[in-house]
Image: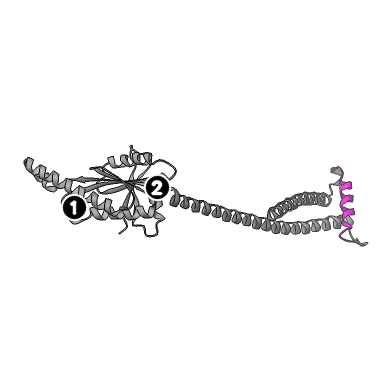
Amino acid sequence: MVSDKKAQLSKFLNNLMALFKILLCIFLAIIIFTWFISVSEMESYVPFYDSLNDFFTNISYIFYTPTKNDDESFNALMYMAIAIVFFLLIFETITDILSDILKMYEKNKEEALAEENDRINQQIQKKYKMHLKTSMRFVVMFKLNVVNPLHETQAFKDEKMEQALKLQAQKMCKEVFSMITMSVKCQIRSNPEMLTLLINDAESLNRILYFIQSVCQVEKYIKNGLGYYIAVTTYLATDSSESALMEAKKLIDMKANRKILCYQIVSECLNLVQENNFKAISNGEYTESEDTIYELVNKN
């Protein structure tokens, strides 16, 4: 507040000096005009010339004392002109100083405002990160997709072979699901085709996703054509998970094989984890979703 008042005072004085300079310039122009009339001996053609000359002569006594040999009229104009130029130089100097002071106040004000904005932004970011850490919950929907290479290369259909491959795929899916449900600690909803995990924090999400990805990368599963669809969505701790489940189902239905699909907020939550294993890359925009869809890929 004190700086603002000083800045206002400096601005007022600066404007006042500018007004004085304008008045002095007008005054100087009148003096030069009067001097020109005197030199040209055109006094009779200019009304009020005698009044102007007497006026300047009387004022000039402030700056000098005439002698007997002085031409009072000429010297009055000369000394008045010199005095006005001198005052103009003084006012110009004062104006420059006041302008510098005003610029300094403005710069300090801008710096103070920028610091305040930075502080507010930091507080907002801090509160937002705390909100992500404490309020966000996660839905992980995990669906297996088995396409056996032998089945695709068969020239003719063999019902027995197809049945054997189907049983093998079911056994492999059951084995993978069982391994995950026994190893992770969270609320799990399961059916023969899909697992749905409800996770309470980003640290657990990071570990569980990494574990699921590691299981699906086992060589024997890859050789037997194991693929998967994974979707991750979020919901608030105070809300129901139903909307997040519906969003996850939409991402699953996109059938992005061996990809972990999510929205940006999931990436923001994972970035708060100290040893985050994933980074998000844009997977594009789709008519099925209003938001950009991201894919979580392993940093390693």
**Magenta region, residue range:** 46-64
Mark 2 burial class by Cα count in 10 Å: few <14, some 14-19, many 20+: many
> Which one is nearer the viewer's eye here, 30 or 118?
118
Mark 1 burial class by Cα count in 10 Å: few <14, some 14-19, many 20+: some
Q: Does the magenta stretch include residue 43?
A: no
Type of amino acid at the residue the image marks with label 1: Tyr
Residue 157 as seen in the image, left or right of residue 191: left
* Quadrant of the snapshot with the C terminus: bottom left
**To which residue does mark 1 refer?**
221
Label 1 vs 2, first from the N-terminus = 2
For residue 85, the mark is none
> Which one is nearer the viewer's eye here, 109 or 80?
109
Which element is circle 2 on?
strand
Residue 79 occupies quadrant: bottom right
Residue 158 as seen in the image, left or right of residue 280: left
Numbered label tally: 2
Contact, mark 1 vs mark 2 (Cβ under 8 Å):
no
Q: Is residue 56 magenta?
A: yes
Type of amino acid at the residue the image marks with label 2: Arg
Q: Position of residue 66 (x, y in %)?
A: 90, 60
Tell me the residue at 36%/54% (across/down).
204
292 is higher (above) or lower (below) than 65: above
Give the alpha-carbon distance from disc 1 to disc 2, as whole Å. Answer: 30 Å
